[in-house]
Amino acid sequence: MIDRSLPDFPWDSLAPYKARASAHPDGIVDLSVGTPVDPTPPFVRTALAEAADAPGYPVTVGTAEVREAICAWFDRRRGVPGLDPSQAIPTIGSKELVAWLPTLLGLGPGDIVGIPEVAYPTYDVGARLAGASSVVAQSLTRLGPLTRATTPKLLWLNSPSNPSGQVLGVEHLAKVVSWAREHGVIVASDECYAELDWRRGQLGRATPSVLHPDVCGGDHTGLLAVYSLSKQSNLAGYRAAFVAGDAQLVARILEVRKHAGMMMPAPVQHAMALALRDDAHVAEQRDVYGLRREVLLEAVQRAGLRVDHSEAGLYLWATREEDCWATVSELADRGILVAPGSFYGAAGQQHVRIALTATDERIKAASNRL
């Protein structure tokens, strides 16, 4: 029997701290989950309504409109020219793709999935669902001597990282791609926070993609990039995302998804296509998060926490060099709920993840309490 045992759902353990934070006289400031709170852009909502008359089944591969928009976005925003529509398909949010990718690629018992040391839990869950196992592969040397039995079939990258906000540079990505090709490893790069880079000189620019010519030499063989519009466009409720890269891998993923009925609703496909072609709303949302980040960063540091990495994305990765649950508890007493770093692996045991996804009023309330 395949062992698909899953870990306890981590967020359930935050319930008592959420109750304590909710008891604050001015109410809770929930900075634990990175869910958007700002409005979905009006033109996207209009596009959804315009396409609402959709009596027939949508196509799993996606409409020509949405696949062409994905390719144009990669060229314009990520510096990846010449992507063909056959190299991209829409997915029902990025989390379901992350969770099912090992299965979609045919991994199973005895196969290994490499994941970051501090990582979004769904990378490990995806390995388990396929009956495979995961191993920390923060650096290639950490994998040790490789044999056929110990070489990962799939290696996850996450840049910018959730939760730490760390960005992997072009040289690092190129070394990983070169190593993966030498060993026949598929590289899947989760790049969902790419438009939210806070480094000086990088504002308004996206972080490097694994599909960028400087990373892969213009050859997308063995490479997949995963992206979501949840963060940049406030479309978490639309479940609007996509995967792109190696045409053969995309075709393999598509074939299984067709049999499984994994189809993005047609109105969402149309809305996503229009959102991908508009950069103005992304810049406006990035400015909103940037101002919230400035307020929260100053307050967190004033409260005696050190912020590590966090150069991109929607979180501050903070520590007092104590057990993360002690920090969670102390902040809950101030009416502020954050996520313990232990949710993201043993290496996060002394950190907490603080989200920027709260209203301006709640961010200011958190700052005052800190």
Image (cartoon, rainbow, N blue to C red):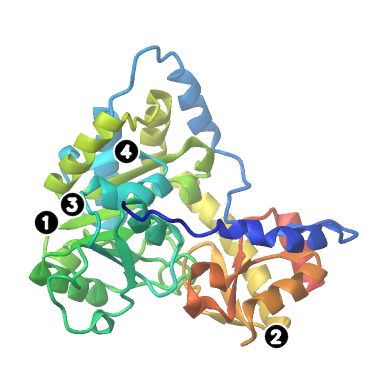
Residue at 31% across, 64% down? 133
Residue sitting at 69 percent across and 77 percent down? 327
Crowding at mark 3 (Cα within 10 Å: few <14, some 14-19, many 20+): some
Q: Which residue is at the far front?
A: 1
Q: Residues within 10 Å of mark 2 (few under 14, many from 20)?
A: few
What is the x, y in percent for residue 115?
34, 68
**Could you tell me how far apart the alpha carbons at marks 2 and 3 are, in whole angstroms?**
45 Å
Q: Can you identify the residue that label 1 sits on?
A: 221
* Secondary structure beneath label 1: loop
Of the image marks 1 and 3, the number of the one nearer the N terminus: 3
Q: Is residue 234 left or right of residue 80?
A: right
Q: Quadrant of residue 182?
A: bottom left
**Residue 81's disc number:** 3
Q: Which mark is residue 90?
A: 4
Which corner quadrant of the image does residue 315 belong to?
bottom right
Horizontally, is 357 left or right of 62 in the view?
Answer: right
Amino acid marked by disc 2? Gly
Q: Amino acid at mark 3?
A: Pro
Categorize mark 1 by other alpha carbons within 10 Å: few (<14), some (14-19), many (20+).
some
1 or 2: tag closer to the N-terminus: 1
The residue labelled by disc 2 is 304
> In the rendered image, which quarter contains the C terminus?
bottom right
